[in-house]
Image (tube, coloured by chain):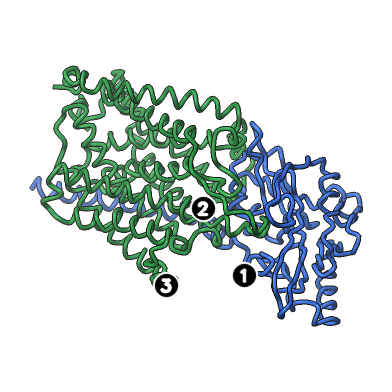
Chain colours: A blue, B green
């Protein structure tokens, strides 16, 4: 079973139960914040905030829309963070979650660049900091429980299940109420597909979701690195050949001159 | 007259410079210890918006700068162009000190520097940074091997020197191969983040561009180092050799320019290149100072034959490389626009200016490298006149 979550943004009422449940389950500290002119609180993901509700004020179809979307690690099918991690501390499991191995991490922060969503956060304020992000409650999933945020959600905005099953569900919802949703399931193909997928009443870019292609972000870098063994052999062969060529050229020259 | 004897006279003038460099080294060391003990947040201005900054920018630059070692090794030993032999030892010394400086700064930049060895035990063959870490480690070892015979020469152990020299060609081939791999993979590092690097710089050709520019830079590194060391030690510089390096670099930069322009055309970025916003301005400065000026200057035989021409042309190259590597790490970064998904819309995009501690540590390491270079050149047979036996 490949665990996934369908986030139906039309059902979210912005209660932040998911934020609180996440902090409670993971023993994450609260943050002192100041009002920044919007409801988002805290303003961004951080080592202590792995799940966040975003309050978007936007206009669509001539109407003012106040839309709430829960944001966290997307647990991509082919995660950029795991691909670039120097020591393989981030790993996509077959069950779905992208897990992080504390004990391997060297704090190089390359994963922060590898993620197309900018999710991983670093513990800058610790002397020996690590990367922190949503774990998909992999520990709860292993015990047959649903993630803490899903359990806390009072409106079933968060639905947990197998990825393929949830995609069918999502398509069904769009088909049943086409006026209610934008005809797109965000995360079905973005960045190679993600485990957390979204349905929305307004276009996703108006909610700040980045426009991403179907390919996973590290397609190019992985292709280049896969050619490393060939490149190595080619370089050694070319250099050895070049050396022999020029050595011969010098030997011939020396022979000519000694005549 | 040997270098050691000549430098006795010039010590007074250089004393001040040496003193300042040593003072900067000590400041860097003390600041470095503070950083290691207290963490990155306490000592740097890095943040989730700019996880990499001054140190990574300088690492990239230093690795390109140290490209003189593998370039000269290939020229002298693989292409068998013996006329360039007089500058190969300064090139290797510069490379070795450059890479050791990179290793130190990389260590200081790691959040878990106490586990720096982890990449040896936990592999990830998909990660460009994994490949770079291994290549840099192994290549520093190769540079050490290329340098060690110089030490044994000084210690009067010709039999050990001869034994190591038997392996010169395999060592050089290993060094050039490792350099080709990691100089290009530094470009692959940014190929892994297509949305984050400004399209003026982002291209699948990045690995090739980084490799070619490291060769061009390496040639100018050797010119600069020879001219500066010549001044410091009051020795006559091998102008013919430096002229040859400058002439060769013209071709390298022409190929590089061609590839850069071709990328602009194919990615339809020609308009953006001349938009004169922040990114475009820095891009144009980088191209003009770092590529066009050197091509023009070094194409002229009069410039090549003058010390000032060689010096300023090579400074232009160095500035161009500095800009290119920092543009990829800093100016061209749109990390803030890619992580706006998880940041409230009213929060201003983050900014980054290096903290004084970041600067102090960076300058400290560079100063230490300069001090070691000076004493190595003074007490070891680095310059041709100090080498006792012909090879």
Left or right: residue B389 versus residue B255 is left
Up the image or down, B199 lies above or below B230; here it is below
- The residue where tag 2 is placed is B189
Marks 1 and 2 share the same chain: no
Question: Quick check: A259 left or right of B310?
Answer: left
* The quarter of the displayed image where residue A9 is located: bottom right
Q: Are marks 1 and 2 in contact (CB under 8 Å)?
A: no
Q: Label 3, on which residue?
A: B266
Disc 1 with disc 3 on a shared chain: no
Left-right relation of B261 to A98: left
Residue B191 left/right relative to B296: right
Residue A116 in view (yes/no): yes
Q: Chain of mark 1?
A: A
Q: Can residue B141 be seen from the camera position used here? A: no
State the image coordinates of residue B313 (x, y, percent, origin top left).
Answer: 23, 48
Residue A213: which disc?
1
């Amino acid at each position: 079973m490949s665990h996934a979550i369908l986030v139906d943004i039309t059902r979210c009422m912005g209660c932040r139960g998911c934020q609180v449940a996440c902090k409670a389950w993971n023993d994450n500290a609260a943050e002192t914040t100041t009002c920044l002119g919007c409801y988002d609180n805290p303003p961004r993901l951080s080592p202590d905030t792995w799940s966040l509700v975003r309050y978007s004020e936007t206009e669509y179809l001539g109407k003012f829309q106040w839309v709430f979307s829960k944001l966290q690690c997307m647990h991509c099918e082919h995660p950029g963070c795991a691909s670039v991690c120097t020591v393989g501390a981030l790993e996509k499991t077959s069950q779905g979650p992208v897990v992080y191995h504390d004990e391997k991490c060297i704090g190089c922060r390359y994963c922060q660049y590898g993620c197309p969503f900018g999710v991983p956060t670093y513990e800058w304020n610790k002397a020996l900091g690590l990367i922190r992000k949503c774990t998909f409650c992999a520990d709860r999933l292993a015990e047959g429980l649903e993630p803490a945020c899903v359990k806390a959600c009072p409106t079933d905005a968060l639905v947990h299940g197998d990825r393929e099953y949830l995609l069918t569900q999502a398509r069904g919802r769009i088909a049943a109420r086409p006026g209610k949703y934008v005809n797109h399931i965000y995360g079905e193909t973005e960045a190679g597909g993600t485990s957390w997928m979204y349905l929305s009443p307004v276009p996703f870019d108006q909610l700040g979701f980045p426009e991403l292609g179907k390919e996973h972000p590290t397609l190019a870098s992985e292709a280049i690195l896969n050619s490393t063994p060939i490149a190595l052999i080619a370089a050694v062969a070319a250099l050895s050949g070049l050396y022999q060529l020029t050595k011969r050229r010098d030997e011939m020259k020396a022979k000519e001159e000694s005549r | 007259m040997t270098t050691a004897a000549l430098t006795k006279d010039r010590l007074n003038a250089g004393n001040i410079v040496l003193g300042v460099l040593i003072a900067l080294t000590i400041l860097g060391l003390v600041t470095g210890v503070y950083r290691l003990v207290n963490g990155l947040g306490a000592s740097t201005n890095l943040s989730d918006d700019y996880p990499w900054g001054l140190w990574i920018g300088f690492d990239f630059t230093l690795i390109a700068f140290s490209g003189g070692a593998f370039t000269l090794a290939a020229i002298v030993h693989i292409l068998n162009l013996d006329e360039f032999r007089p500058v190969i030892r300064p090139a290797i010394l510069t490379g070795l000190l450059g890479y050791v400086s990179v290793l130190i700064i990389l260590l200081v930049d790691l959040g878990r520097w106490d586990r720096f060895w982890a990449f040896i035990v936990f592999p990830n063959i998909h990660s460009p940074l994994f490949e770079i870490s291994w290549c840099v480690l192994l290549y520093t070892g190769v540079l050490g091997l290329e340098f060690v015979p110089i030490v044994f020469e000084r210690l009067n152990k010709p039999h050990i020197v001869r034994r190591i020299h038997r392996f010169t060609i395999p060592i050089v081939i290993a060094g050039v191969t490792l350099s080709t791999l990691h100089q290009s993979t530094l470009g692959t590092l940014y190929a892994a983040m297509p949305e984050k690097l400004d399209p003026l710089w982002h291209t699948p050709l990045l690995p090739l561009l980084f490799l070619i520019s490291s060769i061009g830079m390496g040639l100018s590194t050797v010119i600069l180092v020879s001219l500066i060391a010549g001044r410091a030690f009051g020795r006559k510089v091998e102008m013919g050799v430096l002229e040859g390096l400058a002439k060769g670099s013209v071709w390298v930069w022409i190929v590089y320019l061609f590839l850069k322009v071709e990328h602009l055309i194919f990615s339809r970025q020609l308009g953006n290149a001349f938009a004169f916003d922040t990114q475009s301005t820095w891009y144009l400065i980088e191209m003009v100072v770092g590529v066009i000026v050197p091509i023009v200057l070094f194409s002229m035989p009069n410039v090549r034959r003058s010390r000032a021409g060689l010096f300023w042309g090579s400074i232009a190259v160095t500035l161009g490389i500095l800009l290119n590597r920092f543009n990829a790490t800093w100016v061209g970064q749109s990390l803030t626009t890619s992580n706006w998904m998880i940041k409230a819309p009213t929060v201003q995009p983050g900014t980054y200016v290096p903290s004084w501690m970041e600067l102090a540590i960076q300058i400290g390491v560079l100063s230490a490298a300069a001090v070691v270079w000076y004493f190595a050149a003074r007490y070891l047979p680095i310059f041709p006149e100090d080498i006792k036996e012909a090879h």
